[in-house]
Image (tube, rainbow, N blue to C red):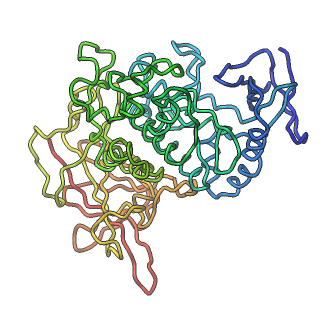
Amino acid sequence: MQKATALSLDSRARFEFIADDHIQGLRKDVYFSPDRRHAVALYRKAPANADLTRLNNIAGPMRRKLLESPAWPYFRGVFSWPLAAVRAGDRVGYVTDAYPQGYFFPEKGPLGGLLKEALWYASARNSRHLPDLKGPDRTGGLKGLLAACLHVSRAVGLLHQNRVFLPGLNAMSCLVDPESWSACVTGVDRTAWDGDGCLHEPPAAPYCLAPETVRALWPEGGGRGPFDPSVWADRHALATLVYGLLFRRHPLLPGKPGGPDDGPGTLEAREIRALGREALFIEDREGPVAPGPEDEALQPWADCARLPYTMLGHELAGLFVRAFRAGLADPAQRPEAWSWEQALLFARDLLIPCEAPSCPSSWYYYAPPSGPANSLAGIPAAARPVCPYCGAPYARASLPVLKLSNSPDYDQGSAPAPNDYSGRSITVYDRMSLFPWHAAPGSFPFTQTSQEARRMAGYFSFREGKWLLINESLKDLHDITDEKPKPVPFRQSVTLGDGQRLCLSVKGMGEGRVMRRIAEVTILKF
């Protein structure tokens, strides 16, 4: 084992790494420290002086600014952020924390030892090689990918709040681990901001580039135009990444339901047109846009009619419309990162598990019928939920739905508040957790939310044909269905019934006023 040393550019720190074992990236080689705690990334091509200054700013002042943020403990796990700019011999690069082991595929398997780049999950063709996504407790599949999209959206949002762009955002610069509901944004060394004085290179993987960027890089007259990072380009890349991870197809490339097969490479003229001046949402194209059903390996992902963009709820669907209809021609229409964060959180609360062992998703979105509590009992068996991914019907005879509201509803009107769960619904499944943001008015799972506030407040269980809510930490939990409220002590349970009303929490509003979080229970029966 041959060891070498990298010295920080300010000569204040030394980092030892193994020189005869590395991972070869597109623009740099990555080496690891002997204890595998740090990674040293060295560029093959010497960066310009302006790029070195930018890298020092990223590893220095910018990192310190984010370290001061109350949300930094959360973001440390979402970014692979440079610790220091370094020099090793005649090569320059940076040091960062090594990736957790969960971001590597198991050694025994078709992808043994490779990084879990989003490219493997955002492509129907590539995902054929993936191991089982479900995990022992159904922690993978759609629910894990929704969580990964949520983390990436928050990461991009943090950068945009600080007027920083991430021009390298694509399916190769994001690592996802659906089994642990985690994601990590890499390529932070390429972040940009107005006035940084650098000539930025376009990403090596071009499939997340915005249409205006593609038109600039590949003008009709030939040649190569400039690459200018922007918040608008980032928003398109984020939307493309979210759509790809959730549907395993590219939103703009017809005939490529699996997205790019091999990552970086030269774009074909047809792809340049489809990504640039002829950009059109794949679900708006006339005629076949994907291989037929005979290509079983790409199903169900290749079928836009079977898995349309609307299948994950109206909030995510609205964002896809803004991104891939209005946003293709007008960048200002593209959704902000926080919009994706909210829509993904609300979609996650309406997932139910698929019990079919062979289901490629393990979870699916279910929008309960609209109507007041107790008006939906005994709906016909034909309305039983069916998994769109494998066709398996919902396995149980009943499905509880909780409609959350605040009472009295101060200053909110009838529309759901953007950062509050009032007016939202959640579907219930066995062993599902109830969190403080479900139970408390004005609460929302922000990135700066403490670990204490993220702990489970209660959980649901299906026992002997009954649905129960077990109280873990809700001091004000009462059954208020009848005139006389019935308290539910800690570690005790309440049986859910159709038309039931629960008070989950009470919040003081000053001047003797209180606001209660109410859950109205509907039991859908099949």
For the question of whether residue 103 can be seen, the reply is: yes
Furthest-bottom residue in this view: 511
Which residue is found at the position 26% from the left and 54% from the top?
A: 496
Q: Nearer the viewer, residue 23 or 212?
A: 212
Q: Nearer the viewer, residue 316 or 92?
A: 92
Quarter of the picture containing the C terminus is top left
Left or right: where 518 falls relative to 437 = left
Which residue is found at the position 46% from the left and 40% from the top?
A: 212
Q: Nearer the viewer, residue 300 or 459?
A: 300
Image height of 406 relative to 373, above or below: below
In x, y percent, where is residue 32?
75, 25
In x, y percent, where is residue 230?
55, 46
Marks counted in the figure total 0
In x, y percent, where is residue 427?
30, 48
Which residue is found at the position 45% from the left and 22% from the top?
A: 260
Left or right: where 125 falls relative to 39 = left
In x, y percent, where is residue 219?
48, 31
Which residue is found at the position 22% from the left and 74% from the top?
A: 483
Residue 447: quarter of image: bottom right
